[in-house]
Image (cartoon, helix red, strand yellow):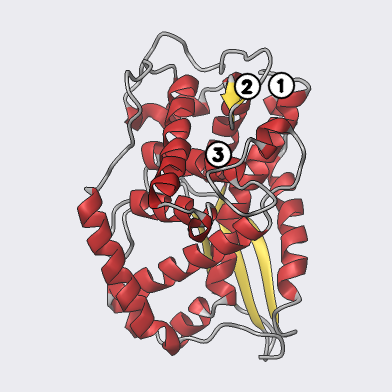
Amino acid sequence: MELLDFIPEEFILDHFDQMNRRTMAFLPPNVSIALRFVNSDDLRIYATSVPGDEGAQCYEIRVSRHLVEFVTRYLFAVARCVDTINGHNIPDPQPSGLPRRWFPDVERMEALLNALPSDLQLHGERVSLFLAIFAEAWDLLLFHETAHITEGHLRFKDEHPERFDDPIYSRSCELEADDRANRWLRDRATALDYPWITGEGTGSGAYGVDPKFTVIVVSILFLSLRVGATTFGEARENYLPLGTRHMLTVIQLLQHESFDATEDLFEAVLYAMTESLRILDLVMDWPQRPISTLVIDVPLERQGELVSAALADHERLRGEWLPYRPGR
């Protein structure tokens, strides 16, 4: 398979349709959700309400084609050149196809990915690796935006737009959408039997299906967007920092309550985050780091303060909006 042969929009639409059929079973019959790709220069995915027939509540998840292109090219390069993932060797890694022996500034990452040749090829197991990584990454993005709808955030915002002049409302809704999406993603962690998915188990995690592959993919996606995005996840006071959301997502996907010791949990978190950093460096042909490091946007102590405040605000506000339920 060549990059030119892969049509990501069709793949994402089919994936969304399968997801949406399950979602609609838990929503009232007058609620609908559609997916639409839009032309814009930013890396963006968002949910919005749209006009519909009388009595209907219609929503769209809109995805910029620029985001689709960015994610596709980056994950294609990952599947092409990664030598190991989840503790397993992937045979015959190839160069990513990006210019070699050139270490770009992170601000130029998007331009570099856009120059990725379309005649690059994947063969055999690496095609399966690419499709699995691509599906897992888009599950997270689509689950998050779907959660804004199912949890009643958009309905509440349409009814009370003035409330969102206060950033604590946006922050609380983002926190809840992350939480719901993480639970959905964890509960349907991929059950494929490729060795790089099944792995060796994570710490003392109790799930029969090992979430480690999902955690690594999510971390790869978060890190690439944090490093390369011009608008997606930019620092704004109404959201938690993207790095903080990244860490919270990894902790939740690992089912933190199943670890016997906090040290085991943080060892698993560190593994996922440093593994994604190793893969980023490998794809971009950046120098190998002498020690494992994390990209820390905000000091850990400050992150803890921000999370505690966001959780307290969410606990205080969450009764103001009502999630959708069948028939309501």
* SS at mark 1 in the image: loop
Using the rendered view, name the quadrant where residue 92 is placed. top right
Query: Image check: 219 left or right of 2?
Result: left
Residue 1 in view (yes/no):
no
Residue 75 in view (yes/no):
yes
Give the mark, 2 or 3, whose residue is nearer the N terminus. Answer: 3
Which-is-in-front pick, marks 2 and 3?
Answer: 2
Q: Residue at x 76, y 20 (%)?
A: 123
- Whether residues under marks 2 and 1 lie with C-beta atoms below 8 angstroms apart, the answer is yes
Q: Residue at x 63, y 27 (%)?
A: 79
Q: Residue at x 37, y 37 (%)?
A: 227
Picture quarter with the N terminus: top right
Residue 126, percent across and down?
A: 71, 25
- Work out whether 276 lies above or below 299: above
* Residue position for label 2: 80
- Work out whether 53 lies above or below 76: below
Give amino acid for label 3: Val
Q: Residue at x 34, y 84 (%)?
A: 316
Question: Marks 2 and 3, Cα distance to the nearest angstrom?
Answer: 14 Å
Q: Residue furthest front?
A: 260
Residue 120, percent across and down?
A: 66, 18
Give amino acid for label 1: Leu
Give the mark, 2 or 1, whose residue is nearer the N terminus. Answer: 2
Give the mark, 1 or 3, whose residue is nearer the N terminus. Answer: 3
Question: Which disc number belongs to residue 71?
Answer: 3
* Residue position for label 1: 122
Picture quarter with the C terminus: bottom right
Few, some or many residues within 10 Å of mark 3 (<14, 14–19, 20+): many
Residue 201, percent across and down?
A: 61, 41
Question: Marks 2 and 1, Cα distance to the nearest angstrom?
Answer: 6 Å
Give amino acid for label 2: Arg
Using the rendered view, name the quadrant where residue 117 is placed. top right
